[in-house]
Amino acid sequence: MRDAGMEVIYGGTALNVDEIVNAAIQEDVDVIGLSMYGRFSVAYKVQEKLRNLPGGPFLVVGGTVPPQDVKTLKEAGIDGVFVSGTSLDTIVGFIRDKFKTRESK
């Protein structure tokens, strides 16, 4: 993401849901990206907290996501779901398009 000109703040792998959301608010981030690796409950809980933040960050997840779970994650309100092997160009393009859509509203 840095190579695409985006600022990245790495929160580590041991943050709980409240720490993730609080860090995002404190740092005024536009996007939260989570590695999945079976951490579906974390993604759902983060998304639930983000719903209460008008104009808050987008949530994208990626990594080991079984194909049958992509639709479920999107239906839960997660903005972007990227399975292993998704190109960086695809992810960056998605994020940029989300910002264009938000800015045009």
Image: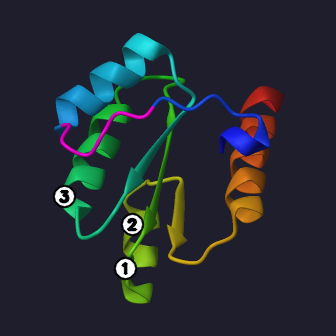
Position of residue 101 relative to residue 86, above or below, is: above
- CB atoms of marks 1 and 3 within 8 Å: no
Hey, which residue is sitting farthest top in the picture? 26
Q: How many labels does the image show?
A: 3
Label 2's element?
helix
**Residue 53 colored magenta?**
no
Please report whichever mark, 1 or 3, sits nearer to the chain's N-terminal start: 3
- 9 relative position to 11: left or right: right
Secondary-structure class at tag 3: helix
Which amino acid, mark 2? Leu
Nearest the viewer among 103 and 26 is 26
Residue type at mark 1 is Asp
Majority secondary structure of magenta residues: loop
Write the start and end of the magenta stretch as one range: 10-15
Q: State if disc 1 and disc 2 touch (CB < 8 Å).
A: yes
Circle 3 crowding by C-alpha within 10 Å: few under 14, some 14–19, many from 20: few
Pointer 1: what residue? 69
* The quarter of the displayed image where residue 100 is located: top right
Q: Name the residue under label 2.
A: 73
> Is 90 situated above or below 6?
below
**Distance of label 2 from label 3 (alpha carbons):** 10 Å
Point out the image quarter for the N terminus.
top right
- The x, y position of residue 80, in whole percent, is 55, 58
Estimate the x, y position of residue 101 in percent, counting from the top left.
Answer: 77, 40
Q: What residue type is labelled 3?
A: Ser
The residue shown at (56%, 32%) is: 8
**Quick one: label 1, few (<14), some, or many (20+) residues within 10 Å?**
few
For label 3, the residue is 41
What whole-number distance in Å separates the C-alpha atoms at marks 1 and 3?
A: 12 Å
Image quadrant for the C terminus? top right
Residue, x 50% and y 76% (percent of image)?
84
Residue 85 location in percent, x, y? 58, 78
